[in-house]
Amino acid sequence: MRLFLYTTFLFFILSSCTSGVITDPELDNLVTLLTGEFSNTDQAENDLTFAHLNLTNTRIWKDKPGYWIFSQIYDAKKTKNIYYQRIQHYERLDSLTIKSTSYKVLNIKKEERSTIDLDYLNKIKIESLEAVTGCHLYFKKETSSIYSGKTKKKSCYTSIPNVDYISSTLIVSNGKITSWTKGFNTKGKQVWGKINGPYKYIRITGKNKWLFL
């Protein structure tokens, strides 16, 4: 009888330990490297052609399929100036590729400050998202802690004046994210975005910021 009770107890202990098993370690690792707060402080101080920006990536909607991140970029000094706000969905595409889909949040309010309003995020519904078509990022694992993602050629069309399409490259590593987005005209000439290299964001806080929506 004691053996039965011990076996039953051990079964429940092991079941509780495995209930949160990570089924895709590579995908989970990429999202872990992405989440947190980053800044290009050193780059902006050494090269005045780069604006001083902060990047925050916050994990949300843990109960939904895939991995969801609320991402925003804002001016490090004038934090009311928010340049980018998107919800991004990361999922496995095939054995070698992870795909990121970017979504606009319809009618999202411009925060007076760059800090994330948790109450507001809690009210966001998937139905209020609008996918940015053709602008998926496709990530490949380069090393154990480096992932490289980029858009497909001439797939991400834009409404930016005089720009036909954009290309984006994102390299994610331990404590660092580099982002390079360039705009091209119909002749394939770059007419928008940085020419002398990507923005280089270095982690300044937290590996993971969890929001349970």
Image (cartoon, helix red, strand yellow):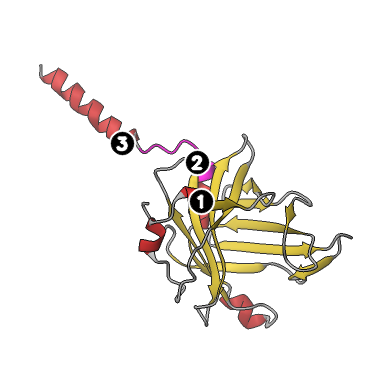
Q: Is residue 124 above or below residue 63?
A: below
Specify the farthest residue to the left. 1
Front-lying residue, 210 or 178? 210
Q: Is residue 111 above or below residue 87?
A: below
Characterize the magenta stretch by its predominant secondary structure: loop
The residue that disc 3 covers is: 17
Residue at 15% in and 19% down: 3
The residue shown at (35%, 62%) is 119
Please give the name of the residue rendered at 42% of the width and 49% of the height, measured from the top-left corner: 61
Which disc number belongs to residue 115?
Answer: none
Specify the amino acid type for callout 1: Val
Residue at figure coordinates x 20%, y 22% from the top left: 7
Tell me the element at label 2.
helix
Indicate which disc, 1 or 2, sits on the residue closer to the N terminus.
2
Q: Nearer the viewer, mark 1 or mark 2?
A: 1
Secondary structure at numbered mark 1: helix
Q: Earlier in the sequence, mark 2 or mark 3?
A: 3
Q: Is residue 193 magenta?
A: no
Gap in angstroms between the C-alphas marked 1 and 2:
10 Å
The residue that mark 2 highlights is 25
Q: Are marks 1 and 2 in contact (CB under 8 Å)?
A: no
Crowding at mark 2 (Cα within 10 Å: few <14, some 14-19, many 20+): few
Give the image quarter of residue 13. top left
Q: Amino acid at mark 3?
A: Cys
Among the two numbered marks 1 and 3 on one chain, the one whose residue lies closer to the N terminus: 3
**Which of the labelled discs sits on residue 31, or is there none?**
1
Residue 99: x %, y % from top left: 61, 45
Magenta residues, start to end: 20-27
Exactly how many numbered labels are in the figure?
3
Visible in this render: residue 209? no
